[in-house]
Amino acid sequence: MVRKTDWPVFIISGGFLLLFVIASLIQVDFVADLVDLSFAWATSYFGAFWQVFMVLVLVVAIGLMVSRYGNIRLGTRDRPDINNFKWIAMIVTTLMAGGGVFWAAAEPVSHFLETPPMYGDVPPGEGATIAPALAQSFLDWGFLAWAVNGTLTAVVIMYGQSKGLPMKPRILLYPIFGEKIMTKNAFGTLVDACSILAVAAGTIGPIGFLGLQAAYMVEDLFGIPNTLITQLAVVLGLVLIAAISAMTGIHKGIQFLSRFNVIFALVLSVVILLVGPGRFIIDQFIGSFGIYVQDFLQLAFYRGDEGWLSQWTLFFWGWFIGYAPMMAMFISRVSHGRTLRELFIAVIIIAPLVMNFWFTVVGGTGIFNELQNPGSVGVPLEEGGQAAAINAIVTQLPFGFWIAIGFLLVTVVFVATTADTLSYTISISISATDDPPKAMRVFWAVMMGAVGSILIVLGEGSVDALQSFIVVTAVPVSLILLPTLWLAPRVAKKMAREQGIK
């Protein structure tokens, strides 16, 4: 199969982003209103489907993991070429960027101050509210989120790769349509374009959001005015990091940033445990995780308050589903030589536990501060948003100024890691090679930064609109992912037969 730039996919995905920016420049309010209407339609008509689909993905994945198919060797190598720590670091940091700091601070505190409707009989802002607040946060960033991004999808992709097929999102449908889906095929082009557009929107949004929020933190910490210049400077720095990392590839820049992120986040966690409410954090993590597991199905299938559900869980489900094809491609790229069981343990056990503990360290400290001094976190969160919340949380700790600087740094690098990884992965899918042209990798990193910068210039509403738009793009992507529920077990059976696993 000829490996060259897929111009139709490139033009459709890049052209739609360009169209979004042009429309925003002409009439930003109209674009924002249109996205809001589309968002409401997507969550209303597809929300229940997404909730059931996410649970089914986890159930099927666990079934494969504990069965004899767990011994299947995935990909085209007999053994991994990346050690365990670097491998898990790359998996964790790629998806964690969106929630690494700001959501980890804001979501648990928000649920503590306004009890999730699932636990509506528990009064807000009291000790009894801690477990429900953290359990709801664990659901939104836990087992289900990770399962959809790197289990069944990765198995189908790596099966296709073992047959010598190029890595493109359309490979997810190869077991149904055969090689004709991989050639010049209009449906295949549409599948690729939708997947790239979804992940680009989901990455550009956090880039723009980071520019706004990091500039707020810089002003709060250093007194540097929170101006448009400051916001754009943050984005420029992030894009430079991402472009250089994407250009150097998997085994250099991306590995280095991922390893740095995990180590730095571990250091921050240890510091907070030592100088902050360490016992409180550990106690609440254990207790709240128990509530999360106990109430898992009720939380996952809750359909009561549709407005609240759209704002929280369904927003995240749309985001993660939109990311899923490209995230699975990246996870597949770095997981050759792993067994299915190794991959699934990393994705649906280790990664969610790391994320949930991180949310308890950051958000739990915020809840502790709010209990000790009501309003100390809640008021900044309400008035200044998520960046104000993280600053309010960590500056109440000993050495708070330096810890806040650490959080600012790790946040920038988290988002840069996602941008570099997904620029690299988008380039793989367009160029149909595991080693895409460096110019293309840099182009996508710069493109996402440029669009994020334009949206910042247009105003925070434009950034919010693009972040919400990924939920709309999740509608076609969720339909692309649906067949993996039965395709993954089917191809696992074929691989087991080929490898002589009984």
Image (cartoon, rainbow, N blue to C red):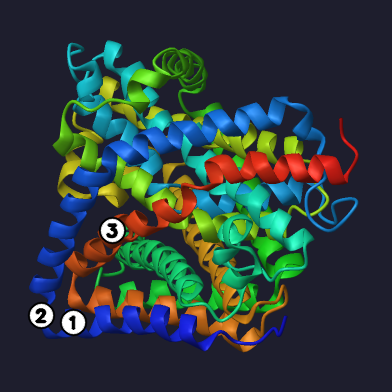
* Residue drawn where x is 81% and y is 54% of the image: 82
Residues at marks 3 and 1, CA–CA distance in whole angstroms: 17 Å
Residues at marks 2 and 1, CA–CA distance in whole angstroms: 6 Å
Circle 1 SS class: helix
**Residue 157 visible in the shown view:** yes
- Front residue of 162/186: it is 186
Marks 2 and 1 close (CB-CB < 8 Å): yes
Which mark is drawn over residue 62?
A: none
Quadrant position of residue 297: top left
Reading the chain from its start, which is encountered first: label 3 or label 1?
Answer: 1
Reading the chain from its start, which is encountered first: label 3 or label 2?
Answer: 2
- Front residue of 167/266: it is 167
Please provide percent x and percent y for residue 463: 26, 66
Amino acid type shown at disc 2? Gln
Quadrant position of residue 165: bottom right
Marks 3 and 2 close (CB-CB < 8 Å): no
Residues at marks 3 and 2, CA–CA distance in whole angstroms: 20 Å
Q: In this view, does 165 lie to the left or right of 220?
A: right
Q: Mark 2 points at which residue?
A: 27
* Residue drawn where x is 60% and y is 68% of the image: 168
Circle 3 SS class: helix
Amino acid type shown at disc 3? Val
Q: On screen, 191 above or below 229?
A: above
Quadrant containing the N terminus in the rendered view: bottom right
Quadrant containing the C terminus in the rendered view: top right
Q: On screen, 319 above or below 438?
A: above
* Residue drawn where x is 62% and y is 78% of the image: 244
Which mark is drawn over residue 23?
A: 1
- Front residue of 270/21: it is 21
Q: On screen, 63 above or below 289?
A: below
Q: Mark 3 points at which residue?
A: 472
Single out the mark in the foreground, 3 or 1: 3
